[in-house]
Image: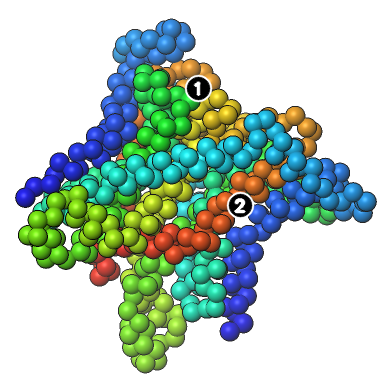
Amino acid sequence: MTVVYLLIPAFLLLASVFGLPLLRYAWLSFHADSVLTGLQPIANDGANWLRLMHDQRYWQDLIQTLRFAFASVGFELLLGLAIALLLHQPMRKRGLIRSAALIPWALPTTVMALGWRWIFNTPYGPIDQFTSLSGISLNILGNPSFAWIALVYADVWKTTPFVALILLAGLQSIPNDLYEACTLEGASSFTCFRKITLPLLKPYLGLAMTFRLAQAFGVFDLVQVMTGGGPASSTESLALYAYWNALRFLDFGYSATIMIASFVLLSTIVAFGWWLMILLNQRGSMAVTE
Amino acid sequence: MKLKSASIILLLAWSLAPLLWQLYTSFSTDQALVTPFETMANRWTLEHYRSVISANPPFFLYLINSLFVGILATLLTLIIALPAAYSLSKLSTTKSNLIRIILVGCALFPYVLLFLALLEIARALSLGNNLFALALPYTALSQPLAILLLGSAFTSIPPELDDAARVEGLTLINRFRWIYIPLLAPAIASTAILVFLFSWNEYPIALTWISETSKLTLPVAMARIAGSSIHSVPYGAYAAATVLGAIPLILLVIVFQKPIVSGLTSGAVKG
């Protein structure tokens, strides 16, 4: 008996929010569609793509986005692993502690982005108040060399719980007798961690890394509310640049070009991530797909 | 063990300190915020909460809007994803794996890149400034996660049960009503809470679809508060808004910690 038709509504929805937009972007990227054309699409022979090639701001934003994504995800994996190892231990009030650890992840990004703006505020935020006691003012959000680090910090704070939970699932999948055997052999707990935990955790690390990299690549809410892309567009992400182009400069053709180009770049990164994951999977015994 | 307790305290401090700082800020007078190291008579105030609550439109309206969109999107997602997940579990391994890969690809996609096309759709179909309509993209964007989570739950139901029910003459709808939904209640709860959290927190689509102040959802309203600085140091009011905006979610996380954790972790194991 076939019940495939039950999938149709879901796939129609998916096609309308994923398929249709990407096709539309691909088409729009070969058209001028801005205030100058009266917001009517007019074919322009790849002028958008040529502009993208020479758009310094785009390449700078790309580097900024990648820098942000790799720094955030790197710290999230390290810290997430530490938290997962901690949460895996038996402890009293485990439920409550897990809830507390989850709160940063559950809060809307914009809500805490506003909070971070205050915490990093110069001269009234707590960080600047304390550093200025010793006569130093870092002016974190006003300094192009520091502002992106504040963003990374805020992102690490928010998404580490998510990474920790995925890794916790991995830890829980490792049978306990492996550790018993390991300690019976007289190995130190660090050796057991290196020889058992890490290899068996690799697929989960790969999964968390791929997922987080893809999401961090599209970072938008945090940047828009916390720094607005500034100072001097030093923290501007690709998504934010595309957003400015569409809603501030009303240049839909170019905005679509930025987004389809970002999509292609991201797909390449994710494909690479998956390839890496499959490679790691062959060594771990855990199958990530059923 | 000392080390463990210390790590737990460190973890709690790391997670909660920024929130506690917001709480502290929200009760401090502007004067206290500007000069924190001076002693003063008027250290504490409720003024920030008063100004946020009495703003026009009142703050709780944003909570209601978010709640409405969240519940609507969650219900719609389940109505569409449950049958789809069932169907996925009945397909051959090759086909269902292919569909799973497509779904994982969609789940990975940073949906913020879709906002422009979605905005065009909203304009073409006049879906802007409508909270009912806003639930539609949320429903669509939630499908990958929901189908993957529910799909793996469906495969845990023994096929004999399904066959027996069919032999007894139960229609598909009755099998859902009497067998699948009760059996899958934990997975459904996990999915529902994750979808609700996504809809409640969603920003870029709400930002571009909704412009009328009275229809804003909480994340957009918060960002707007950030953009409209009337006072020289409006951070007290910001902080009060942050605290009020955070409370419902903190309660939600405490109450639904188990389904959230199991949703995220089973997503990791089986996705």
Q: Position of residue A114 (x, y in %)?
A: 64, 42
Residue at figure coordinates x 22%, y 64% from the top left? B156
Q: Which mark is residue B247?
A: 2
Tag 1: amino acid: Leu
In front: label 2 or label 1: 2
Q: Amino acid at mark 2?
A: Ile
In this rendering, would A211 be left or right of B225? left
Give the percent coordinates (x, y) of residue B178: 23, 58
Along the line of sight, the residue nearer the viewer: B88 or A119? B88
Residue B212 drawn above or below residue B53? above
* Side of B88 relative to A160 (left or right): left
Write down the residue under mark 1. A247
Residue in front for this viewpoint, A119 or A153: A119
Q: Is label 1 in a helix, a strand or a loop?
A: helix
Q: Residue at coordinates 23% horizontally, 38% vertically from top-left?
A: A9
Name the secondary structure under disc 2.
Answer: helix
- Chain at tag 1: A
Query: Which residue does the image show at 42% across and 11% down from the upper left?
Result: A39
Residue A187 in sight from this viewpoint: yes
Chain ID at mark 2: B
The answer to whether marks 2 and 1 sit on the same chain is no
